[in-house]
Every structure is written in structure tokens, then in C-alpha cells.
Image (tube, helix red, strand yellow):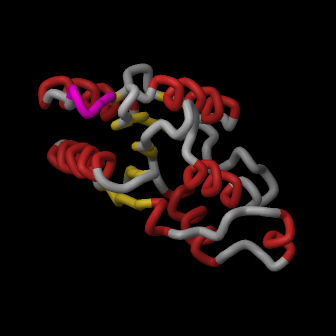
Amino acid sequence: MVLIFVASLNENVKLAKRIEEELNSKNIETKTINLVEFNLPMFDTNKLQNGIPQKAQDLFEEMNNATGYVFISPEYNFNVPPVLVNMIAWISRIGEDYRKTFTMKKIQLATHSGAGGQDFLNSFRIQLTKLGAVVAPREIIATYSKNVEDDSLKKVLDQYREFL
């Protein structure tokens, strides 16, 4: 099972659907989670004192059982969107080892961003690597003026499938 995380609405959701369809056509089971709609409360230590939200605990279990993740996100202010950082903040507080959910997980990055998303991709790649994940070398990049071509998407996801 590959979990597909979407960190926005609109164009990134459309890109997620294309990626999901392509992975499914390669007999890879997927589940898409839109983090905006998932609606985790904003992490802070005061909320942590009241316990980890059940939806974060359930997501932690799903993530631990997944073989890999695909993260699809726009770039916000030259970086990672808060909804994505927030999810990782909650997940990293569950259990004894904050890296457990990411260690050796195979990750594919994708973005649909107005300015190309390269700052998001670079920042998030560093964060995921520090968490112990193995990030696929090629990224899926779309903008408003240049969509991802089908052949290119298939090639990147073929490599990701082999990477899994």
C-alpha cells in the first residue's frame, strides 16, 4: 500500500488523481489522504498535554503499514505548507522513536506550484532525509503553464515502482 498525501486543494488534487490512477494501473494499491480535509488541529505542546488526536494515531498506524508515500504539495512562501509540517509534527510525537514512521520509507515527491515548487521540493527532501526516509531521485513537477506529460509521469512512476 502506498499512501498519497495531498497538502492542498485544486491542482494538486488533480495531480494526485493522475498519480493514483497510474500507480493503480501498475497494480500498486493506494490510498489518498488530503491533509487539508483531514483537519488535524494545529500542533502545540499545550494540545499535546491533552493527548494525541485519534485521527493522528490512526494515521500513524496506516503509515507504519504502508510500503511508501507520495507527497503532493504546492510551495508556500518558498517552503513546505503548514498543513504538511503539522501532520509530521503530530506523527513524530507518537511512540518512542520520532523517526520510526519515516525510516527507510520510499517516498516520491510531486508538486503543482505557480513558481515551479523547487524550494518546496528541496526543503522537504532535506526534512524527509533527516527523518530517515529514502526519497526517489526524480520529482513530478507541474505549473500553471506546464502540465506533467503522460509519458514523463509514467516513467517517473515506473522508477518509483521499481524503487519500492
- Image height check: is 62 above or below 104? below
In this orientation, which residue lies closer to the viewer: 4 or 141?
Answer: 141
Residue lying farthest to the top in this orientation? 137
Q: Is residue 60 left or right of residue 117?
A: right
Q: Main secondary structure of the magenta part?
A: loop
In this image, 153 relative to 78: left or right?
left
At 66% from the left and 58% from the top, the residue drawn is 91
The reply to whether residue 27 is in sight is: no
| Residue drawn where x is 57% and y is 71% of the image | 58
Q: How many marks?
A: 0
Q: Is residue 106 left or right of residue 41?
A: left
Quadrant in the picture for residue 81: top right
> Is residue 143 in the magenta section?
yes
What residue is shown at x 24% (from left), y 50% (from top)?
14
State the residue in front, 155 or 96. 155
Is residue 117 shown above or below 103? above
Residue drawn at x 38%, y 26% as measured from the top left: 116
Quadrant location of the C terminus in the rendered image? top left
Is 28 part of what is drawn in magenta? no
Q: Percent position (x, y) of residue 129?
A: 63, 29
* Residue 155: percent from left, percent from top: 21, 24
Q: Position of residue 20 (x, y in %)?
A: 25, 50
Residue 13, position as x, y percentages in the image: 30, 52
Q: Is residue 108 visible in the rendered structure shown here?
A: yes
**In which quadrant is the N terminus drawn?**
bottom left
Q: Give the extent of the magenta segment.
A: 141-146
